[in-house]
Image (cartoon, rainbow, N blue to C red):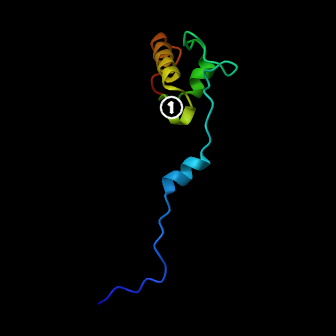
Amino acid sequence: MAPPPRNRPRTRINRKRAKAKVRGKKKDPIFVEGRRPRPMYVDYKDLDLLKKLTNRQGKIIGRRKTGCTAVSQHAVTRAVKRARFMGLLPYVEE
């Protein structure tokens, strides 16, 4: 059996590029007044900020979702681990 005739050219939508355009660039939550603090330090006692950067299960949220840069993400990770060790944040929630 022969394939059906093609009346129109095949077009393919690149869904990855379409989604990338929709997603806006997020601002780094660690930056103070739009400037990177030097040295980069996130206080482990700032529980409000650390709870924003962890999900309901207590896992650290990734850079793509939070908008952190690599340097600030490392600082967040260190702060969350310190807060867990000190007993300020739980290792596992729910």
Query: Residue 65: x, y in percent?
Result: 54, 36
Q: What element carries label 1?
A: helix
Label 1 neighbourhood size at 10 Å, few (<14), some (14-19), many (20+)? some
Badge 1 amino acid? Arg
Picture quadrant of residue 47: top right
Per the image, the residue denoted by label 1 is 63
Picture quadrant of residue 5: bottom left
Quarter of the figure that contains the N terminus: bottom left
Q: Against 19, is 65 above or below?
A: above
Query: Residue 12: x, y in percent?
Result: 47, 65
Query: Residue 59: x, y in percent?
Result: 47, 29
Name of the residue lying farthest toward the left: 1
Residue at 61%, 37% (x, y): give it.
Answer: 25
Q: Is residue 71 left or right of residue 25?
A: left
Q: Against 87, is 9 above or below?
A: below
Total number of numbered labels? 1
Q: In this view, does 39 lie to the left or right of 32?
A: left
Query: Residue 57: x, y in percent?
Result: 49, 32
Residue in the foreground of this view, choosing between 53 and 35: 35
Residue at 55%, 47% (x, y): give it.
Answer: 20
Residue in the foreground of this view, choosing between 22 and 76: 22
Name of the residue lying farthest toward the front: 9
Residue in the foreground of this view, choosing between 21 and 67: 21
Name of the residue lying farthest toward the right: 33
